[in-house]
Amino acid sequence: MNAFWTYCFTRVEPISRRTNPIAQHLDKIYDREKNTGKPIKKMRANIRSKATEILYKKLVSAVR
């Protein structure tokens, strides 16, 4: 889980690192939640949850 947290922390939060489509999608969610004033820990948890969901769907579609 630590490596996944590091991925989210280093690939989604810095604007310059949002280069792939998944990171760009998570970027929209991150920026939307940031503008609402949510606490950072809650935002990061939501981003990790959404990233897990997206990556799992990509994995399942690749296996089929």
Image (cartoon, helix red, strand yellow):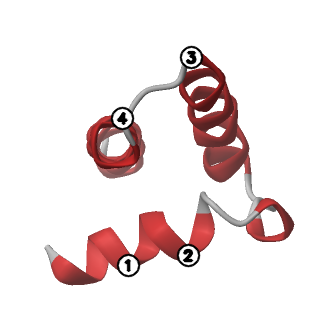
Which residue is rendered at x = 81% and y = 62% of the image? 19
Q: Are marks 1 and 2 in contact (CB under 8 Å)?
A: yes
Sequence-wise, the earlier of marks 3 and 4 is 3
Placement of the C terminus among the 4 image quadrants: top left
- Contact, CB < 8 Å: mark 3 with mark 4? no
> Mark 4 is on which residue type?
Lys
SS state under label 2: helix
Mark 3 or 1 closer to N-term?
Answer: 1
Residue tagged by mark 1? 6
- Please rate how many residues cluster around mark 1, counting C-alpha atoms within 10 Å: few if below 14, some from 14 to 19, many from 20: few
**Dots 2, 3 in contact, CB < 8 A:** no
Label 2 crowd bin: few (<14), some (14–19), many (20+), radius 10 Å: few
Q: What secondary structure is found at the residue carrying circle 1?
A: helix
Q: Whole-percent x and y of residue 61?
A: 38, 38
Q: Secondary structure at mark 4?
A: helix
**Residue where numbered disc 2 is placed:** 10
Q: Look at discs 3 and 1 and give the one toward the viewer.
A: 3
| Residue 32 relative to residue 41: left or right | right
* Mark 1 to mark 2 CA distance (whole Å): 6 Å
9 displayed left or right of 31: left
- The residue sitting at 29% across, 48% down in the picture is 41
Q: Position of residue 54 (x, y in %)?
A: 40, 38
Q: CA distance from mark 3 to mark 1?
A: 24 Å
Callout 2 amino acid: Thr
List x then y, in percent, for residue 60.
28, 42
Q: Residues within 10 Å of mark 3 (few under 14, many from 20)?
A: few
Q: Quadrant of the N terminus?
A: bottom left
Residue identifier under label 3 = 36
Q: Residue at x 58, y 39 (%)?
A: 26
Choose the circle earlier in sequence order: 2 or 4: 2
